[in-house]
Image (cartoon, rainbow, N blue to C red):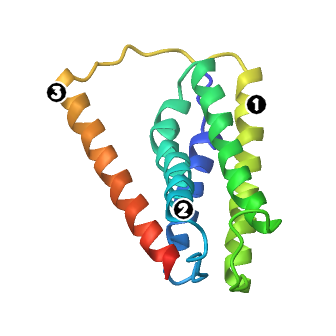
Amino acid sequence: MNARRLTPILLILAVLSMAPLIPGGPVENRSFGHIPVAVLIAFNAFITLVVLGSIPLAALARRGGRDILVWVIADGLGYVAIFALDLLHIFPVSPTPMSPALIGFELAGLAFGLAIIGSAVRDLRRPQPEQTPSRALSAGARRLILGGALGLAGIVIIAGTIGALH
């Protein structure tokens, strides 16, 4: 059996490293009020997709097939894009400078993104792990989980957008 451990751990660490970066929070205190609200909503939706997408990918990457690893690589590329664009002052640009703590968190996020990509590529080269039969969730349970995830994503996007405007 060839269980993958590093890739799921990196995905969860990346999620945890993003928690203090909610706009208006203790680390991310820049103002983006000059950016159109629709653009902020789109950017926050992208960040939310990358971060919340890491959670099920972490569970699936442990024993998932090649298609899951491709999604993990895409998620890692999302982290790289988020942090590289910000660190290179491409987007989003704020008149408020980045604090040293924010720069540290962003460098860590960039490193996690690169590590996720590297780990998933390494896992792609290894033999696929043994698949254990899974018990499928009922349609009602899947709808409940999807509804909860969408509700949480909506709350995060709205809170992040409001925080970024101040």
Q: Along the line of sight, which residue is nearer the eye, 126 or 107?
A: 107
Left of 148 or right of it: where is 42?
right
Q: Is residue 78 left or right of residue 17?
A: right
Decide which of 84, 17 is in the foreground and name it.
84
The residue under label 2 is 40
Identified by mark 2, the residue type is Leu
SS category of the residue bearing label 1: helix
Residue 99 placed where, x, y %? 70, 85
Q: What's the amino acid at mark 1?
A: Val
Compare residues 57 and 144 and report the one nearer the observer. Answer: 144
Residue at position x 42%, y 73% in the image: 162
Side (left or right) of 43 relative to 60: right
Which residue does the image show at 57% across and 56% down from the upper left? 43
Taking the image as shown, residue 137 lies to the left or right of residue 119, namely left
Q: Disc 3, disc 2: CB below 8 Å?
A: no
Taking depth in this image into account, of 138 and 149 the one nearest to the observer is 149
Quadrant containing the N terminus in the rendered view: top right
Residue marked by disc 1: 121
Q: Is residue 130 above or below residue 22?
A: above
Nearest to the eye among marks 3 and 2: give it. 2
Q: Position of residue 151 (x, y in %)?
A: 29, 50
